[in-house]
Image (tube, rainbow, N blue to C red):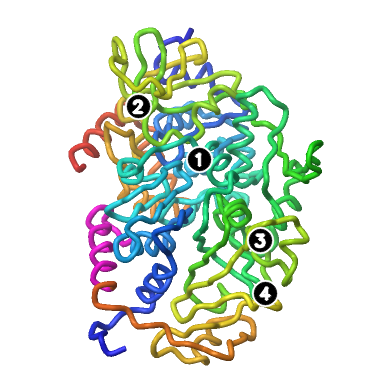
Amino acid sequence: MSHTPMSHTATEMMSIAAARLLTDDDVCFVGIGAPSAACNLARLTHAPKITLIYESGTLSTRPSVLPLSIGDGELCDTALTTVGVPEMFRYWLQGGRITIGFLGGAQIDRFANLNTTVVGDYAAPKVRLPGGGGAPEIAGNCREIFITMAMGSRAFVETLPFITSFGHGKGKGDRERLGLKTRGPTKVITDLCVMEPDAETAELTVTALHPGVTRDQVQAGCGWTLRFAGELVETSAPTAQEIEILRDLHARTKRAHGVAA
Amino acid sequence: MAEFVSLAEGIESVVRDGCSVAMEGFTHLIPHAAGHEAIRQGRKRLTLIRMTPDLIYDQMIGMGCAEKLVFSWGGNPGVGSLHRLRDAVENGWPHRLELEEHSHAAMANAYEAGAANLPFAVFRGYKGVDLPKVNPRIKSVTCPYTGEVLATVPAIRPDAAVIHAQKADREGNVLLEGIVGVQKEAVLAAKRSLVTVEEIVEDFGPRNANAVILPSWAVTAIARVPGGAYPSYAHGYYKRANDFYIAWDKIARERDTFMAWMKANILEQGPEVFAHHAGLARQAA
């Protein structure tokens, strides 16, 4: 823990903790935003051979800057090949060739179900969100799902107004009852901690706190009463190399888009 | 055989009041110039179909062209909300907008079913989620071989498809390259189609034997509109104007700034401005 002279932001810690979970052997379906930063950081650090796939049809892409949209030209220019969108969803995703689906969301509940559709009533919404896009079938068809999103009591909620993407439903066994053969969400990487579904109940349980973060801080960012694992570990602080590569990636991205992605 | 037309003629004959129209493009090759022409011609009561309605549908919805939207992800990619879409859904401005909402997998499969002249698409999806509760067109079928219950959605069969492509040749064949999305499926699923292109060439010349080509006899009309995908991009021609997508957030947030922008930049302009936009985008690239 003493090799970390550089300070870091909570968002950087989130990207780095998420990136560390990926390996060279993964075939990863990448959502835009926080998942994209984590997946590319992994590729630029310890997992150079990771296969990254974006739903626009780009297979094995190696962008030098983070794409602003899911279909930026950078993704196509650096891809091994680019296929049409029906083929993407039918052969590659539904075909069972993806090991990890990496999703973000507007809201999540204690069983890692996600909402990106509406806040309020569907027919007369208070806030109309973009909708599901690829997420409902990514959540169902990838071998397992990692979710990354920043904590806050409006994002981590007791009850979702709408289930856009299915996690563990109302608890252990719900996926199997629906005939889903995939594992669903196995990790939720936030800016404060890492959560994993409990082996018995599938309820999200805090298994690691990021450096300097307290249980109270994590609970304050969550709308339900959180469970903490008996053996709670501390996430290793970012290394200087991880921070440097992540910041370089964001700086290149900013120069390319005129915005931090 | 495809007919070469002006953009105004193409929109007039292909996109008619009250019809269903798919103006497709998955971030790339979005037919912005064609959408602007439909706005200028005052199209009404359209059913707009698209997996990823973005700025051009935000503009058409805000200008009152649409009565229904069939979609799977409605946002400003990488930036945030589509404010005109939200204003229509949340507040009914400029009028009520009916939604038929799907997932990407559902729509991609539904376009393919449309192109294949099938009545519906079948896929493994929608399990445990709430969309089937609010979209009665999502149903299921039991596989006659394995007993597995699979999701179904009706095929998409639009009255019109509108896409942008890189090139047409003199015979009216159309070539698309890069991220090709669902454009081929949309054109083949539709009754009529309009393709705007960056350029018309004598012959495509040497090309990959597996290039995405729509034969002339599968396309209704072609209009040359250089830069017609701006502010999205045309692979090999110009890059995506990300700064415009970011700027749109502010323009579209309020009704009066939106209307003022539409008046100055669309109602009082013609398709020739797109060549200028794309030229600037090329220089910036």
Question: How many residues crowd mark 1 within 10 Å: few (<14), some (14–19), many (20+)?
Answer: many
Mark 3 against mark 1, which lies toward the viewer?
Answer: 3
What kind of residue is marked 2? Pro
What kind of residue is marked 3? Phe
- Identify the residue at image location x=58%, y=37%: B108
Question: How many residues crowd mark 2 within 10 Å: few (<14), some (14–19), many (20+)?
Answer: many
Q: How far apart are the alpha carbons under marks 3 and 1? A: 29 Å
Where does the image place residue A216, in percent across and percent down from the top left?
Answer: 52, 92
Is A173 rendered above or below residue B111?
below
Mark carried by residue B271:
2
Tell me the subunit letter for badge 4: A
What kind of residue is marked 4? Ala
Q: Is residue A250 magenta?
A: yes
**Magenta-tinted stretch:** A243-261
Q: Is residue B172 left or right of residue B279?
A: right
Q: How far apart are the alpha carbons under marks 2 and 1? A: 17 Å
Q: How far apart are the alpha carbons under marks 4 and 1? A: 40 Å
Q: Quadrant of the N terminus of chain A?
A: bottom left
Mark 2 against mark 1, which lies toward the viewer?
Answer: 1
Mark closest to the chain's N terminus, 4 or 3: 3
> How many numbered marks have been drawn onto this rendered protein structure?
4
Residue picked out by circle 1: B57
User: Considering depth in this image, is B107 or A59 the residue closer to the camera?
Assistant: A59
Mark 4 against mark 3, which lies toward the viewer?
Answer: 4
- Identify the residue at image location x=33%, y=33%: B234
Residue picked out by circle 4: A202
Helix, strand or loop for disc 2: loop
Helix, strand or loop for disc 3: loop
Is residue A131 in view from this perspective? no
Residue picked out by circle 3: A166
